[in-house]
């Protein structure tokens, strides 16, 4: 049995006390939701997914470690944020890319804004099989790549107000 708990980040951190929501059941008090998420035994037959939502927009910010599949609202956010493939110099549109876990899921990577990014199929394969690595990845889409030869490249997401494609800096 699975149970989703939707809670905004500030409430999860104890900075606010907005109610959390159990989809299909309704709201629960913030302290009850925090207690529930903190005290569930690891061998419980019930799976609770922590879904962290932005308190202003209500958009999903993080689906935690229990979900590999990227929820549609998070996929739309990553596509809009990245605009194009995050590989240095690639301009393939993000809506034609795959959404990749910078730190692989199998290596404890999360399904979250800071760990996801758009990569075209070719560059996703280079990262997965040819020694290219993303060494840092942040919520705003900035990431640092390392080539198989040890060269470093910095990728910055585009200004979504229309100032052009993303920029990459070699280092």
Image: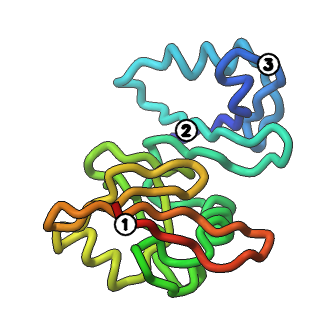
Q: Quadrant of residue 5?
A: top right
> Which residue is rendered at x = 59% and y = 65% of the image?
157
Q: Position of residue 164 (x, y in %)?
A: 68, 79
* Mark closer to the observer (3, 2): 3
Extreme residue toward the front, this view: 171
Residue shown at 62%/79% (left/top)? 165
Measured as percent of width and height from the top left, residue 31 is found at: 72, 12
Pointer 3: residues within 10 angstroms few (<14), some, or many (20+)?
Answer: few
Nearest to viewer (mark 1 / mark 3)? 1
**Up-down: is 43 above or below 54?**
above
Per the image, label 1 sits on a secondary structure element best described as strand
**Residues packed near mark 1 inside 10 Å, few (<14), some (14 to 19) or many (20 plus):** few
According to the image, label 1 marks what residue?
170
Which residue sits furthest left? 149
Q: Mark 3 points at which residue?
A: 16
Between the residue at mark 3 and the residue at mark 2, the CA separation in whole angstroms equals 20 Å
Percent coordinates x, y for residue 154 in the rendering: 42, 61
First reached walking from the N terminus: tag 2 or tag 1: 2
Q: How far apart are marks 2 and 1 (CA)?
A: 39 Å
Relative to 162, is 120 on the left or the right? left
Answer few, some or many: residues within 10 Å of disc 2's Cα (few below 14, many 20 plus, some between 14 and 19).
Answer: some
Q: Which color mode does the image show? A: rainbow
């Amino acid at each position: 049995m699975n149970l989703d708990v939707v809670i905004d980040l500030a409430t999860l951190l104890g900075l606010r006390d907005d109610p959390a929501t159990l989809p299909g059941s309704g709201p629960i008090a913030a302290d009850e939701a925090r207690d529930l998420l903190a005290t569930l035994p690891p061998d419980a037959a019930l799976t609770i997914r922590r879904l962290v939502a932005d308190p202003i927009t209500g958009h999903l910010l993080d689906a935690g470690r229990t979900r590999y599949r990227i929820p549609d609202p998070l996929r739309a956010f990553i596509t809009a944020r990245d605009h194009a493939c995050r590989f240095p110099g690639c301009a393939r549109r993000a809506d034609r890319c795959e959404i990749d876990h910078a730190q692989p899921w199998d290596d404890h990577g999360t399904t979250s804004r800071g760990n996801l990014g758009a990569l075209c199929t070719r560059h996703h394969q280079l990262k997965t099989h040819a020694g290219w690595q993303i060494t840092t990845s942040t919520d705003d889409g900035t990431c640092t790549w390392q080539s198989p030869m040890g060269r470093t490249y910095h990728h910055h997401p585009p200004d979504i107000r229309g100032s052009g494609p993303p920029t990459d800096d070699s280092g």
